Image: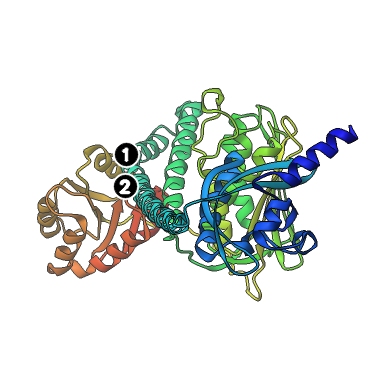
């Protein structure tokens, strides 16, 4: 064995070509006699003191870094590369090199074999080749950057189209929801105790659920486009939490869930948008109900910690796998594959929760002990620095107005809304075009006009301007009734002369609060 090792050492030392071994840092570890003779160094002057790149001129050094190193990392060897070496006397020596990368234990080493070239002009050719390779690499980089920029522009365009699609989809969905909502209100009023409560409650529950899904689509669209604006005011969270629990009581009862609610002593005040924060609690409760088998236990807690309000929703449902926890708040994230999921949902509820909470300067986190062990979502919001909770007021039903003009090209929506208004004693007139609306304003003299925006002849904004310009038009309460509910739509309605902006489907209770009382 010793003789074999000695023979190998002898072959290494006496080889006709230059043999050099370098470490991962580029320093020469060993060099045979031929290499030392060509370079003009003693063995003790090379090992651990000179790096191979120190022996390369600038052009060859650049070529080594841009060409040789990447190839070594990928395939472990480089062959037939012409470079020039600089010896101790600053003389250039054209050589042909081959490099092989090996792993010796935990270390990475490069074995260099250098062959002297007879043609002295090869050095110039090697420089030219290095220059061309560098130019080719630079051109390839430019092309890659151009492709990346084009891909980014395509992604941005696709993202904008997605946001526009969500906004348009929610608008289109609101149109059929509007007559359904009004029809249900009429049925509740007319049938009263005579109706089978299971039918109306199921209709109402599913209609509210569909409306919440449409609202979520709109809110997510606003958040992703950076257009959600908060109407900030002191919000008392104890009342808000109880209100959300009350709103979802039909959903909990339908799934035979038991909802336990506990809140800190009011007031628990935060500076925020009450409507958006209610959405957060509703979505967390809906998520818990959806992913908890029938007859489950769901807990809703509100607590105060130093400087923060904490809302926790806990369930004993299907739980969340550990690897899914980091992505559970991502857009369109689902806890179950679509084909295996029986609970429905778009996968945007939790993304909306995170977006709204972060706009309020808060945080939201998910926790679970694993599949079948339930889950817990915790929202933390900064408490208001100093704010008094506004006294709650009992709102009495507003007496019905005398005359209401309904303008909508969707005949079902117009007829159902008219029937709902007539239940409260309103005298109504229904038309389906802007031209008929202008005629009705002159003949009918309404106190309130509910105008759809997407009319077949002119849009509702222009109609509102023309109504305002008519004799007596300034005294009419104009309400925009539309499926478009983004902030820019509200601003455009105000600029056109509307007093109020309501999105479909209308909540008849909200509408009644906007109607002036009968003299």
Q: How many marks?
A: 2
Q: Secondary structure at mark 1?
A: helix
Q: Is residue 397 visible?
A: no
Residue drawn at 11 percent across, 60 percent down: 442
Instruction: Pick the residue in front: 441 or 423.
Output: 441
**Residue 170 appears at what percent x and percent y?**
36, 44
Residue identifier under label 2: 421
**Residue 129 appears at what percent x and percent y?**
43, 54
Q: Is 235 on the left or on the right of 316, as rendered? A: left
Residue identifier under label 1: 179
Using the image, tell me which numbered label, if any, was put on residue 497: none
User: Residue 411 sits in which quadrant?
Assistant: top left
Measured in 3D between alpha carbons, the distance from the residue under mark 1 to the one under mark 2, in whole angstroms, is 13 Å
Taking 153 as reference, is 104 above or below it? above
**Residue 109 appears at what percent x and percent y?**
72, 47
Q: Earlier in the sequence, mark 1 or mark 2?
A: 1
Instruction: Pick the residue in front: 291 or 131.
Output: 131
Q: Which residue of the protein is positioned furthest toward the bottom in this rendering?
A: 386
Q: Is 248 on the left or on the right of 182, as rendered? A: right
Q: Is 235 on the left or on the right of 296, as rendered? A: left
The quadrant in which the N terminus is found is top right
Instruction: Pick the residue in front: 479 or 134.
Output: 134
């Amino acid at each position: 064995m010793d003789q074999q090792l000695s023979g190998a050492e002898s072959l290494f030392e006496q080889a006709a070509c230059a043999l050099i071994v370098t470490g991962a840092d580029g320093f020469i570890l060993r060099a045979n006699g031929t290499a030392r003779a060509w370079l003009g160094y003693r063995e003790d002057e090379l090992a651990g003191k000179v790096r191979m790149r120190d022996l390369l001129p600038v052009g060859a050094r650049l070529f080594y870094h841009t060409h040789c190193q990447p190839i070594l990392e990928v395939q472990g060897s480089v062959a037939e590369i012409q470079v020039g070496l600089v010896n101790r006397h600053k003389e250039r020596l054209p050589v042909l090199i081959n490099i092989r990368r090996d792993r010796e234990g935990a270390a990475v080493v490069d074995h260099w074999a250098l062959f002297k070239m007879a043609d002295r002009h090869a050095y110039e050719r090697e420089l030219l080749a290095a220059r061309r390779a560098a130019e080719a690499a630079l051109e390839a980089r430019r092309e890659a950057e151009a492709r990346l920029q084009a891909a980014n522009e395509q992604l941005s365009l696709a993202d904008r189209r997605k946001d526009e699609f969500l906004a348009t989809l929610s608008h289109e969905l609101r149109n059929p929801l509007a007559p359904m909502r009004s029809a249900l209100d009429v049925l509740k009023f007319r049938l009263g105790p005579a109706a089978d409560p299971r039918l109306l409650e199921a209709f109402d529950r599913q209609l509210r659920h569909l409306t919440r899904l449409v609202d979520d689509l709109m809110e997510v669209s606003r958040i992703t486009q950076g257009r959600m604006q908060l109407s900030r005011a002191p919000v008392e969270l104890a009342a808000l939490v109880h209100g959300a629990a009350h709103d979802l009581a039909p959903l909990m009862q339908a799934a035979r869930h038991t909802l336990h609610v506990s809140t800190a002593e009011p007031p628990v005040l935060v500076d925020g948008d009450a409507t958006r924060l209610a959405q957060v609690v509703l979505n967390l409760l809906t998520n818990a109900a959806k992913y908890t088998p029938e007859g489950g236990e769901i807990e809703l807690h509100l607590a105060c910690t130093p400087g923060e309000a904490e809302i926790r929703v806990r369930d004993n449902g299907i739980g969340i796998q550990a690897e899914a926890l980091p992505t559970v708040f991502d857009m369109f994230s689902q806890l179950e594959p679509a084909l295996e999921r029986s609970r429905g949902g778009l996968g945007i509820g939790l993304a909306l929760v995170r977006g709204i909470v972060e706009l309020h300067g808060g945080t939201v986190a998910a926790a679970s002990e694993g599949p079948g062990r339930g889950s817990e979502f915790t929202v933390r919001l900064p408490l208001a620095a100093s704010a008094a909770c506004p006294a709650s007021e009992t709102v009495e039903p507003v007496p019905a107005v005398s005359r209401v003009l309904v303008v909508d090209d969707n005949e079902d929506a117009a007829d159902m809304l008219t029937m709902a208004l007539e239940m409260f004693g309103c005298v109504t007139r229904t038309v389906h075009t802007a031209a008929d609306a202008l005629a009705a304003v002159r003949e009918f003299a309404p106190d309130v006009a509910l105008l759809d925006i997407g009319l077949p002849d002119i849009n509702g904004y222009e109609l509102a301007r023309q109504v305002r310009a008519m004799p007596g038009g300034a005294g009419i309460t104009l309400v925009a009734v539309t499926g478009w509910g983004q902030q820019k739509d509200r601003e455009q309605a105000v600029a056109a002369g509307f007093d109020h902006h309501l999105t479909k489907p209308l909540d008849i209770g909200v509408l009644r609060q906007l109607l002036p009382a009968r003299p």
